[in-house]
Image (spheres, helix red, strand yellow):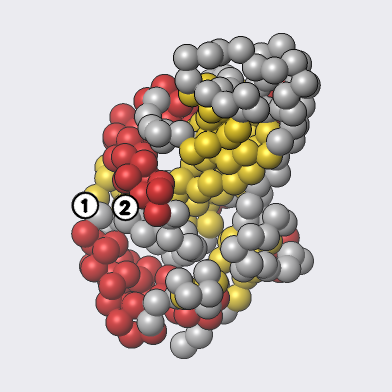
Amino acid sequence: MRIILITLTLLISACSNNGSISEKGASAFPYRYNNEIVKAKPIKKVIVANTSFGRPVMSHLRKADSRVKRHVKEFLKDSGYQVLPEYHFENAWKQAVRSYGQPYDPSTGRIDNVTWQRVMYTAGQTLKKQTDTDAIVFADVIEHNAQHNNGLQHLARFNGVNRKPMLRGADKSIPLGFDWNQEIKAASLLVNIYNIDLQRVLMNYGGISTTQELDTKKADPVWVRRRKLLSSEDDIEEAMAIAFHPFIKMSDYPGKEQPYETLLNNQSSDQSTDQSTDQNADSSATEQAEPAQ
């Protein structure tokens, strides 16, 4: 069996002016979807992993990540999927970790890829034996760089969404020469779906919201972390609709539809891409390897 390890960051574009669908689409992630796998073996039952696909979620986003995962489960149920209890995955993952160790080293901020592959493979085998699930869903909140633009609304565009700047303080006026092109932080939903044979079905992102707001209490406004992170249910709903497309069809998907991939093309593409595990890397990478026996 082969399993695919994906560690990637986002392609953020600073587009201009208004919030048209085409400009939102320009920021949409070019998703990876394997329709051939789904056609060969339809997915009806899923387990939402309670661990991250790679590095653990950042500490200041943990509550938000848990809240988003609850929304994801309801989204899947509303879309006609049976969601099995997450303890199945939790137990399988813990057993695998006891055998091979934790893949993530918090002291270095790095993932041991070989360990991760062993843990993932073993957990998958346990789930295959002990449950009748068809797929594992990883739904993770990740933080990345974004930018507001110089247009009239100063929109930040990332992963298929447009978000207006949030302001802190009674004074809502911004100095004329303020630099809107500064990089700030934003959060997106990263969805990875693997069938029970650990073949990748979907990888896609959906933008949620910025995680910084502009503090206007000072003469020179500065970006600070928002007090309430990812609190808008509408933003979360939009992110889920985008990130699960086309596994769950979004009628007004804001991005460009990608061609369906066959398993062969999926594998050859993954093998041609180098992998980066640096926590601060700005490039995307993919690696496919045989799990160690």
Total tally of numbered discs in the picture: 2
Is 42 placed left or right of 221 in the picture? left
Is 53 placed left or right of 62 in the picture? right
Q: Position of residue 182 (x, y in %)?
A: 71, 36
Write the residue at 35% across / 55% down.
49
Q: Position of residue 219 (x, y in %)?
A: 62, 24
Q: From this view, report whether residue 115 is shown above or below residue 161.
A: below
At label 2, which amino acid type do we have?
Answer: Ile
Among the 4 quarters of the image, the one containing residue 173 = top right
Let me know if residue 89 appears in the view: yes
Is 253 placed left or right of 13 in the picture? left
**Element under disc 1:** loop
Among the 4 quarters of the image, the one containing residue 290 = bottom right
Residue that label 1 marks: 85
Write the residue at 62% across / 56% down.
8
Q: Mark number for residue 47?
A: 2
Write the residue at 39% across / 25% down.
232
Measure the alpha-carbon separation of dots 1 and 2. 7 Å
Between residue 210 and residue 25, name the one nearer to us. Answer: 210
Let me know if residue 244 appears in the view: no
Q: From this view, report whether residue 201 is shown above or below residue 89.
A: above
Is 185 placed left or right of 26 in the picture? left
Write the residue at 64% across / 43% down.
145
Between residue 29 and residue 64, name the one nearer to us. Answer: 64
Q: Position of residue 240 (x, y in %)?
A: 45, 34
Q: Do the residues labelled 1 and 2 touch (CB within 8 Å)?
A: yes
Q: From this view, report whether residue 213 is shown above or below residue 142.
A: above
Mark 2, Cα crowd under 10 Å, few <14 / some 14-19 / many 20+, is: many
